[in-house]
Image: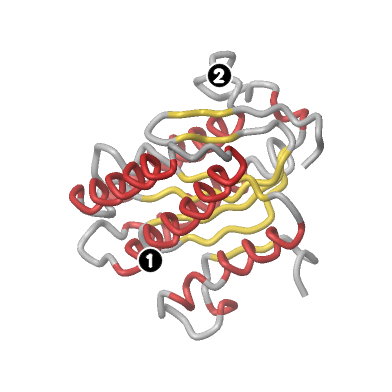
Amino acid sequence: MPDNTQHIFYERHMPHYQPHDATYAVMFRLAGSLPAEVIQQLKAEREEYRRFVSGMVDDKRRNELLREHAVQHFEKFHALLDEETKGPQWLKQPEVAEIVAAAMHHWDARAYEMLTYCIMPNHVHLIFSIGSASTVPLPDHPLKGQTPYVVTNILASIKKHSASKANKVLRRSGAFWQDETFDHVIRDGEELESAIWYVLFNPVKAKLVKDWTEWRWSYVKPGLIE
């Protein structure tokens, strides 16, 4: 990450770090895809660990431990999503999955460079890169001029437009996506490669297919992997 990268933190239910020139791995999920009691338990565990390390004098070591714990927290959260079968799984429907895929492709080469994604039955993984030019507020986004958080803008646009169309297909109303998203800055090429394979192998890990290439709702930029 360049030394002159602007550090941006966004916090709603959890902190988001959004430098203007970076590669991101994000994950967003369907509303109600995990029971409320499970979410509360995960939040309690996260807060307990933060309190545990809050008294550390070594700031660098404390931040390292928090980063490691955040990764572990995400992996546990993700495993629960893959195992959950009682919550909504609207993304199983091809017409709905196609809507979400189209919403992500809409911003490719406009607001970001899309590297990979995977649409699972109840959540979505997306990896993209943005440059400094993408900090300009998106012209057709309802938050234009109101926030400097370009990743938040992009995801809000994807979620808003896909939710509206998906609800029409499903003949339902109400929240389609959960408000909160996970976003993580990828710091180097090695981490990017690992993140891409993590996303592509999600359907295999969830035992939906035997080979990642069999999953219809995965995408990787041509030439990115061998």
As rendered, which of 47 and 71 lies closer to the eye?
A: 47
Residue extending furthest bottom?
A: 210
Q: What residue is shown with label 1?
A: 79
- Left or right of 177 on screen, residue 117: right
As rendered, which of 82 and 156 lies closer to the eye?
A: 82
Above or below for 93 versus 213: above
Under mark 2, the amino acid is: Thr
Relative image position of residue 149 (x, y in whole percent): 58, 26
Relative image position of residue 147 (x, y in whole percent): 55, 19
Q: What residue is shown with label 2?
A: 147
Q: Quadrant of the N terminus?
A: top right
- Distance from the alpha carbon under mark 2 to that under mark 1: 32 Å
Relative image position of residue 140 (x, y in whole percent): 58, 24
Q: Quadrant of residue 83?
A: bottom left
- Left or right of 90 on screen, residue 119: right
Question: What's the image's color scheme?
Answer: secondary structure
As rendered, which of 98 and 36 lies closer to the eye?
A: 36
Residue at x-position 66% and y-position 50%? 186
Residue 26 in sight: yes
Q: Are marks 2 and 1 in contact (CB under 8 Å)?
A: no
Relative image position of residue 113 (x, y in whole percent): 72, 46
Residue at x-position 55% and y-position 24%? 141
